């Protein structure tokens, strides 16, 4: 059995039953550099993000969507840290997650980044449902992205998400190839519960 087949189903070993789509979601680095996501599917994935919960329905999540081959994709890729730049160029789409920090001229939105996170989570699960994969990244230069896309002071770049189809992990550098097939782990649930009364 090839590595690419082995990594397609990397379901989590959960302590309790969860929805299969949640158990199956993982963050690959090996994307198919030839795959193109059709526009209807991409719109569906972004629509899932649009319908994520939002405090007071303020909807502070904004996205910069860049398809591979576009100058916007190259700009985002160039702003990634070296360890992410090494593999993210094979993704079909790079999506910058931006949080609008202010409700209006007088009020900040304390839940803006949280709500963006929910939107990206919805995006990721919808992508998984569509047979695609996502990999969220924190290693990038937010100031460079803000300048390149002319973002305002109240628009914070929070994350970059690679979106695409699984590729051959054998094409990755050795260190990344090891990570691609390493066992999936999480802290035990008991460690996450500060109070469980």
Image (tube, rainbow, N blue to C red):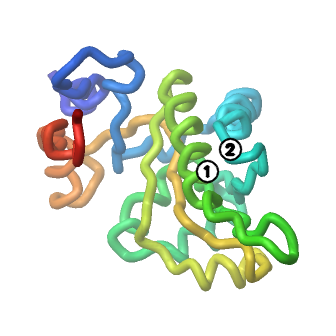
37, above or below 64, in the image: above
Q: Residue 20 location, x and y as percent?
A: 36, 16
Q: Residues within 10 Å of mark 1 (few under 14, many from 20)?
A: many
> What's the mark number on residue 82?
none
Mark 1 lies on residue = 115
Q: Is residue 96 visible?
A: no
| Front-lying residue, 36 or 118 | 118
Residue drawn at point x = 29 percent, y = 50 percent: 171
Quadrant where the image shows the N terminus: top left
Q: Residue 179 location, x and y as percent?
A: 19, 51
| Front-lying residue, 27 or 176 | 27
78 left or right of 37? left
Residue drawn at point x = 65 percent, y = 38 percent: 53
Residue that lies at the very extreme toward the right in this rendered image: 105
82, above or below 10, in the image: below
Quarter of the rendering containing residue 150? bottom right
Looking at marks 1 and 2 on the same chain, the residue that comes earlier in the sequence is marked by 2
Q: Residue 52 location, x and y as percent?
A: 65, 37
Quadrant where the image shows the C terminus: top left
| Count of marks, rendered view | 2
Mark 2 lies on residue = 54
Residue drawn at point x = 61 percent, y = 58 percent: 111
Quarter of the rendering containing residue 152? bottom right
Question: Are dots 1 and 2 in contact, CB under 8 Å?
Answer: yes
At mark 2, the secondary structure is: loop
Residue drawn at point x = 39 percent, y = 66 percent: 84
Q: Residue 5 location, x and y as percent?
A: 26, 24
Q: Is residue 45 visible?
A: yes
| Front-lying residue, 97 or 8 | 97
189 left or right of 60? left
């Amino acid at each position: 059995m090839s590595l690419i087949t082995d990594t397609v189903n990397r379901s989590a070993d959960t302590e309790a039953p969860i929805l299969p789509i949640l158990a199956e979601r993982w963050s690959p680095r090996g994307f198919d550099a030839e795959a193109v996501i059709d526009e209807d599917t991409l719109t569906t994935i972004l629509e899932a993000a649009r319908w994520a919960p939002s405090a007071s329905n303020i909807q502070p999540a904004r996205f910069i969507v860049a398809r591979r081959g576009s100058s916007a994709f190259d700009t985002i890729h160039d702003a990634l840290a070296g360890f992410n730049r090494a593999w993210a160029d094979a993704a079909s789409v790079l999506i910058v997650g931006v949080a609008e920090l202010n409700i209006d001229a007088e009020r900040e939105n304390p839940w803006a980044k949280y709500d963006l996170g929910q939107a990206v989570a919805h995006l990721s699960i919808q992508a998984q449902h569509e047979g695609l994969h996502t990999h969220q990244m924190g290693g990038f230069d937010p100031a460079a992205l803000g300048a390149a896309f002319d973002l305002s002071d109240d628009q914070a770049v929070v994350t970059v998400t690679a979106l695409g189809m699984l590729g051959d992990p054998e094409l990755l550098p050795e260190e990344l190839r090891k990570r691609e097939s390493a066992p999936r782990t999480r802290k035990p649930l008991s460690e996450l519960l500060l109070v469980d009364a």
